[in-house]
Image: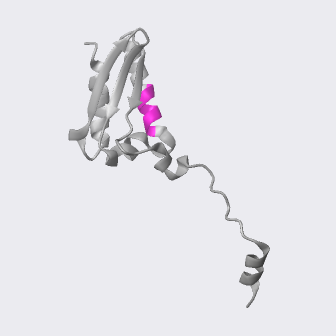
Amino acid sequence: MAERDQEFLEFVVKGLVDHPADVKINRTVDEMGVLLTLSLNPEDMGKVIGRSGNTAKAIRTLLRVVGMKNNARVNLKINEPEGGTMADIPERKGPQQPQTRSLDEVMDDLKL
């Protein structure tokens, strides 16, 4: 009965991804509450995280509701795929520095 949060997460995530067989959920309980650790196929990361993380936020909110029904605090951790980094996502890299050029280079470009 206490593992309904894990069953719920598995149902939701497998409905979103293209590789449901690769979905793995590890459930640990400690004094802080329940931690669900989600591992999935790297190709499915975008589907689970969503634009600006909105899908992941929604899943976390629903997990908290499921946890409240069972008097437990439920948290979700999404494992990053091996070899990948969050810095590889263009939105996460930060602003690009403009390329600097010398005055001579700019003047050469202006010549016809």
Depth check: 40 or 65 in front? 40
Query: Residue 71 occupies which quadrant of the picture?
Result: top left
Task: Point out the residue furthest to the bottom here.
Answer: 112
Return the x and y of residue 98 as percentages of the image width and height.
Answer: 68, 61
**Colour logic:** one colour
Q: Is residue 28 magenta?
A: no
Which quadrant is the C terminus positioned in?
bottom right
Left or right position of 3 against 80:
left
Return the x and y of residue 101 as percentages of the image width and height.
Answer: 72, 70
- Total labels drawn: 0
Query: Residue 72 occupies which quadrant of the picture?
Result: top left
Depth check: 62 or 20 in front? 20
The residue at the point 71 percent across, 82 percent down is 109
Return the x and y of residue 79 as percentages of the image width and height.
Answer: 37, 34
Which quadrant is the N terminus positioned in?
top left
Q: Is residue 112 above or below residue 43?
A: below
Return the x and y of residue 53 as percentages of the image width and height.
Answer: 48, 40
Q: Which stretch did the figure color magenta?
A: 55-61
Left or right position of 41 against 47:
left
Query: Residue 10 occupies which quadrant of the picture?
Result: top left
Left or right position of 101 against 83:
right
Depth check: 80 or 54 in front? 80
Q: Is residue 65 above or below residue 90?
A: above
The residue at the point 75 percent across, 88 percent down is 111
Q: Is residue 5 above or below residue 49?
A: above
Task: Point out the residue furthest to the left here.
Answer: 21
Left or right position of 51 against 9:
right
Chief secondary structure of the magenta portion: helix
Depth check: 76 or 8 in front? 76
Q: Is residue 58 magenta?
A: yes
